[in-house]
Image: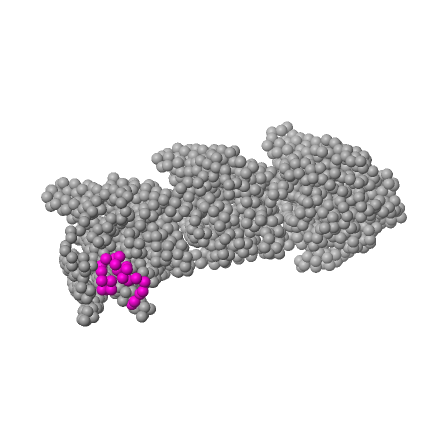
Amino acid sequence: MLVQATETAETVLTSGWFLDHAYIIPLIPAVAFFLIIFFGKRMPMKGSEFGIASMVGALVFSGGAAYQWIQRVNGVSEEAFVEPVIKSWTWWQNGGFSFGIGQHIDGLSLTILVVVAFISTLVQIYSTEYLHGDRRYTHFFASLTLFSAGMLNMVVAENMIQLILGWEIMGLCSFMLIGHWWEDGANSRAALKAFFTTRTGDIGLLVGTSVLFFAANDWTQKNLGVSGFSIRGLSAWALSGTAGQAAITVGAVALFIACIGKSGQFPLHTWLPDAMAGPTPVSSLLHSSTMVVAGVFLVARVYPVFFEGMNILGTNVNFIVVIGGVTIVIAAALAFVQTDIKKVLAYSTVSQLGYMMMGLGAGAWLPAVFHIFTHAFFKACLFLAAGSISHSASHHSFDMKKDMGGLRKFMPITFTTWIISTLALCGVFPFSGFFSKDEIIDNVGYSGYSLFMVIGLVGAFLTAAYMTRATYLTFFGSPRGAAAGEHHDEGHGHDAHDSHDAHDAHGHDAHDAHDSHGHDDHASHGPRESGPLITIPLIILATLAIGSGLLNAVPFGENWENLKKWVEPRAEVVNVTGVKEPSGSHGESRFVLTAPSGVVAAEEGGHHKSDCGKKAPESGVCYAPQLNHAPFKWSKAALSLGIVFAGMIISWLLCVQLYTRKNKALVGLTQRNKVLGAGYAFLANKYYLDHLYEKVIVRSIAYPISRGAYWINQNVLDGIVNGAGIGSRKIAGWVYRNVDQRVVDGAVNGAGNAAQGAGGALQPVQSGKVNQYGALLFGAAAIGALVLVIINT
Amino acid sequence: MLVNQFLMLGAILFCIGVYGVIARKNAVLVLMSIELILNSVNINLLAFSLRNGSTDGHTFALYIIAVAAAEVGVGLAMVLLMYRNRRSVGLDELSEMKG
Amino acid sequence: MEVLSDHNWVLTVGTFLPLVGVLIMLFIPKTDEVLSKSVAIATAAATLAVGIFTLIQFNYDHADKMQFAADAEWISVIKSSYLIGIDGISLPLYFLSMVITLLVMIYSWNHVPSPGNAKAFFILMLVLQTGMAGTFIARDLILFFVFFELVLLPMYFMIGVWGGENRQYASLKFFLYTMFGSALMLVAFLALFFKTGAESFSIPYLIENGAGIAKNTQIWIFAGMFVGFAVKVPMFPFHTWLPDAHTQAPTQGSVILAAILLKLGTYGFVRIAIPILPAAAKEWAPWIGLLAVIGIIYGALGCLAQTDMKRLIAFSSVAHMGYVMLGISTLTDFGLNAAMFGMVAHGLITGMLFFIAGSVKERYHTLEIKRLSGMLVQMPKLGWILGFSAMASLGLPGLAGFWGEFPAILSAYQPAEGLPVETFRTYMVIAAIGTVFAAAYLLWLYQRTAFGEPTAEFAAGHGHDEDIHDVNKFEWIAWTPLLIAIVVFGVYPQLMFKVLDPAVGVTLKAFGG
Amino acid sequence: MLSTSAAAWTTPVVDYHALAPEIILAGGIVLLLLLDLFISESKKWILTPVASFTALGAFIPVLTLALSDEGARSMFDGRYMVDDFSLVLKGLFLLAGYVVILLTSDHLREGDYYQGEYWFLLLSSILGMVMMASSRDLISIFVALEFLSIPAYMMAAWRKRDLKSNEAGIKYYLLGVFASAIMLYGMSLLYGIADSTLLVDIGKQLGEDVTAIRAVAVLFVVIGFAFKVSAVPFHTWAPDVYQGAPTPVTAFLSVASKAAGFVALVTVVYVGFPGSHEVWQPVFWILSALTMTVGNVMALKQTNIVRMLAYSSVAQGGFILMPLAVAGIDGVANSALRAVVTYLLVYAATNLGVFAVVMVVSRKTRSGEISSFGGLFSYAPGVASLMTIFLASLAGIPPLGGWFGKFAAFQSLVSAGNNWAYALAVIGGVNSVVAFGYYGNIMREMWMKPVPDGDTAPVKIHSSLGVALGITGLATLVLGVFPGLVIHFGDIAGLAGAFGN
């Protein structure tokens, strides 16, 4: 059904072509995908042109849509509810209901659309250089494009099924992209692990969707004329007060489990670092800014369900917030012991996702979404920078300790962009991260989750610390290994050694690219700045890393809070009257929005507050719960900034002591502590991690392996997966051998043998002797006669 | 009346015949025993038709006698054939086929 | 039940045309293989043309009614008549059978398994086609039974003559299992016939009067049918013939078996057992559901236990049919729609997988997973197709498999009134876990066979090079339609749901569905 | 009775049309005898067509009678009845006989045959069967029975020099005569009870009440025919005789003479003992269950094809007996009769076909072992396919004739609706599965096994054998796909005077 607001006295909603046709956005890359598959190889640029073109197209469309949305919002008063632009065509029908596919466009979806389209464009441009000459160049772009299509589709999704569609397509693409260099077993295993882990989480998605559907469908069909899958319907139903608490809680928990899997939340986060086996652009796109935020997006998308289901703002602790908090610390702590620069970034991603989840869990909806927005830019930038380093400076290695150091002189652009993004990530004023992250922490505290505010601050400290360490190792100090010009093939971090065999199969990032460069850069191994196709995206992203924060710069006062105005759905009671026409493929039904009826909302602290989410609306429906917004206080900001700087300085000093000065006290300490090997010299962290893992992961997952934090972490999930795999394989084998092959077949064959045996037993009767035959003949007759005589007399 | 005695006689003959068929290994004797049974049947029939005063019994008996004659003819012919082929009329040698 | 009976010759022609082809082929000398093949394929093509005509003439606004219905005298003495027609439920399967047969034949053009004798091989396939199509159009129990059994012998010989090493055991096992089932099924049919007043074997009539039977009697009759159909499906624990049959059967046999023959059983449930005996169905549903979920997990475990690619695929059928049966056991329109969609989807996908397995066997002369590796290096196209099919098989949205799997899980959350809700919700969770298992064994298979480097024995320059070539012409012709169908139905499932849904609604009238 | 016999002799009215088949057969027999006497050896070939034409010629009046709408024709005070039932079966006997003639005429090429006498005996036996179909009187039944048996004894022993054939003859003869003697004893008792040899009167006299003596009488009569249909435990002769006798004779015995036995059985039970079904229903139940099971189980063990077929035909007999186990229940009688007749027709067609194939193959391989069928499909696909069709039909797989016979049997069982009937139905079901064990075994030999002696020269099929194969194969298929045709006969096979109506 095409649902759109009609003009009434109170609400004048403008719309526009882009807004009405936003559903085209995912179609563009989808089409491009098939073009690449079928014609890519024959194109001059091996199909990458399709990909880039489609991304640009998507970007234009979403930009236009965003613009028109802003118009639409500006057109109405501050408090009025802004109807999202919803379209739906019948996709499938069942039990007489027809379920749609279409678009559900509002501030949230547009924000993500723009981000995804934008980052994808840059990453694809970047990849043309980075993967130049790769043997599966075309496949790579195909998967990349399909991936974006999936993500975009998930974002515009009008209902859960469509959302699942995009969700799973992303899973598939991550499988294909992580395993891009599948010749090396390690990569394909990582790919398998990623897909399998997220798939495990998806049980929750299937179950949750089912539960919610059946719980909501009747209500939604009756009141809104939409199915129980539709996001709009679910949101309204959740806030309608008619929802059964049990159903909605189960549904919310189930869905969140899926988010845990997808967004790499504790305890299902271990696939994310492994996923770094994929080419760097993949890491930058999938595992920093888009795919992993899918889970966060899902929570934000059907927020009312979680709001009611988890009783957010009702208590001072709930499932989401806990998971988020735990993830922040764990991941951050892990980032310290990495030598692989990409893994540092991976863990930092996990921990940032933790922030987002924690924010959502604590009712800080807007800051969380805002953090998705800003984080996308600086994290993508960081990954691309790392890629740039390995591409041009460290001879395709990601090992900070072995192959980097002192690079700031050689690659100024990369360095600058890196620094900017790092500052943004750490949340230093006035970089973008500050505005989003600090808001989250602030609001978490404001909503009464004090404990988690503390965790947030600790996280901020750790973030600052490990980023400083990474920065120091990479750009400062003296050049080491490849960075110093030594050309060695062995020991490239997690790189597989067979990667230089005669044939061109490679386990390692961008070796093809390397080979394709010819031997000139073998001749001059020296690190240097990367080419424009790499640096320009970096610069663009860095700029945004600075600027994007201003979109919702709370510190600067009300009129800077644009995102709040444009994106946050207004919690308003909306009267929905209207007729539902037969749900044909294009059967339209108009919903007339009238003025907020019922209670005149109470003014409080200059902020308009409705009762949505607190109690059921007497008439009409709510589409969003009323949330709090912490008033900004410089004092608080100063505190967190202080913590951040503290982190940086301490970390810096220690790094200097360790890596440059080789301070005896510390270095000696590592000699006395072999447990984690020479790589793990950071004293505090070492003890901290052992402690952490033995307490948290091991006990909670009850998987008794503790041979060093990092090792554990690597093996918790592997262990479970393999264990499960091996275990079930064993069970399976046993069942198969004994039940399947013995019992059943045994019965069958046994019957056969029995028959044969009986035949044998009867053969003597067939002796061939006439007299015996006669005897048998008469004997039977006589017996029969005897029986008859007896029973008849 | 003496129908019962006739029937008794028939029964006895029948049993003797059956015994012969089962016990005798000599084809000819078995043949004879079968004839014995047939005669027991004839006696029955005659006795009954005597009691009922209807002629059907007699007719039946005549048919049986006639058919029995034919049977014996065929039977003896076969026995002869058997004797010619294996110089014996022992039935228990006839077990070429079994199982 | 009103029917539309214009063009009522179509079904008869579509069903028996293959036999005409058989007659012609009988007069072709055995040596002239090309001619036999051409005639057979031409026949199949003509049949498909009729099928397409049916598809066009089908009145989609009345998908719930029996169409092209014909009613001719057959065995009047036992009140059984030649009563045929198709509605939304039978149409997809009816058409699918024609498509599959044609594709399989095209594939067989240069893939006639040893010991050759293309003529006989193709004749058997044509006979199979008639049996399969007939089962889906029959609306009279006896007619149904005859067609249902007609497929037995051809498949028996297909496995037994053209199969693998252990073919004789496998074929006999297949035959005896199925025959045993159908014997009981026949008794059940007869009991049904007499309990409804010995008036008629026609399904519509029985639906009218079946509900009147005393409940206990219904339960017994249903039991008989259950065994008959469950063996065919196959449901745990009647499944053990399947892996052997599949493993030993020639590629073509496996494809037909997986794509169509297994559906005869589930179709029987939907078309006969459930609508005629609603009360018994309600009693049985929880148990069917239980067996279904056991099948899902058990099949998955079976897959993980396998070292042979084809056998793995075979076990995956057990799991997938588990989802179908779960959907059926809910007795809701959601469930049945899912089940029907699942049947077609499984037909397309698993059929495809068996095709691939066949081609792999042909190239590597083995299907042992640990000997196969790096397929993507040596035959990228085949490798990607395998990946595609595996993804489809594990129920990836956007591909056909999803629409059989997810709605089935969904429907288990809310079974028909009178069924134990908690039980079915448990089933739902188990089934959902089953999807992960599916991902596990399929990806495991894919990673082991397609990724990595080719094993030494098959690496380049070891003499296998001439065998190991990428997808060839006939394979493309045979596979493309399946691949397209998998995508199309995955992207726009309404194509099929639109046809199924109304018909399913009618089927479930007895449950107020 | 007394009155009629005491009254002045009245010449009975003879309906020559009704008797035409018998008359033609008799004429043919005499003609054969004379020809055999007077024509020279070189012209002996003429006898074969004469025999066949006799059989076919006798079939014509059967048709005309069937088409004439004048219902049941009764003669000799109802001792000789020409009703639909008898006509259907006369047709069956004549056609079966014709097929056997075809088989034999092929077999004669083996030499060592006294064909004149052979044709004479064969036709006489057929005549006996034809009479059996119409007999409604103990005497005529007895006479007919001996008439069809005695020639059969001699045919079984036809290979004079062959020990096996001898043995077969003697065994068949002694046991046959013994069985008929027992039957006669029962008949004598019946006569005593009912004071009449006319089945209808006996039926009236016996009535419902059962006494020991009546029960025994009924039992003995039933046993007499149970022997003919080789029902376990009265089957022991069958395997030996079938194996020893010449193959065409075996075909004849396993089809025609078995059918005759069933005809007699049905007539006696339906017309003679309608009231005393408490006696014969259990008997038939036990016989049927035993016969199916033992027959199948023994067949599984066999390695000789003919012997295996012997057991298979024993088992088939069990299936044919199934409906009789419930025939006494109200409303089932007709469907049971229909089932028996239908099954007989289908079984005749199929089994003759099987033996035809056996002859073809053994002609080539010179072996009676099942293994001699190995790889038949590779060098004689046509024959192999036909054999497959026949075997599948015997196994009761749709859409081949056999399935419908079984179906009809099951149907009448289930329609009886009591637990005994269901039990028997289940036993039958299981048996039909077991049966596939050995039928499938032959299929496996033909399709999936290699040729034992690697001799893949194509088989030669003489025209007459070809015709036989054609007829039987066609019949098997058609009866399966359009059972309406045959069941139609079965349907009109109203047995005049059955259950006193």
**What secondary structure is the stretch in magenta mostly built from?**
helix
Q: Residue furthest top?
A: A44
Q: Give residue A673's quadrant in the image.
A: bottom right
Residue C449 locus on image (x, y percent) = 55, 45
Along the viewing direction, whichever of D29 and C287 lies nearer the viewer: D29
The percent position of residue C344, horizontal first and vertical second, equals: 53, 42
Residue found farthest to the right: A635
On the image, the x and y values in percent for residue A42 come to 60, 29
Camera-side residue of A582 and D249 = A582
Relative placement, left or right, of D388 versus C233 is left
User: Which residue is located at x 75 percent, y 40 percent?
Assistant: A108
Picture residue at 28% right of the left edge, 47% below the top: D71
Q: Is residue A520 left or right of residue D46?
A: right
- The spot of residue C464 in percent (x, y) is 49, 40
| Residue A580 visible in rendering | yes
**Residue D292 vs residue C41: left or right?**
left
Color scheme of the displayed model = one colour
Total number of numbered discs in the rendering: 0
Picture quadrant of residue B19:
bottom left
Q: Is residue D173 visible in the rendered structure shown here?
A: no
The image quadrant where one finds the N terminus of chain A is top right
Q: Is residue B49 magenta?
A: no
Q: Which residue lies at the image location 68% right of the left edge and 31% below the top edge?
A: A53
Foreground pick, A2 / C459: A2
- Return the residue nearer the eye: C465 or D136: D136
Magenta residues span D189-212
Position of the C terminus of chain A, as image quadrant, is bottom left
Membership of D196 in magenta stretch: yes
The residue shown at (37%, 48%) is D404
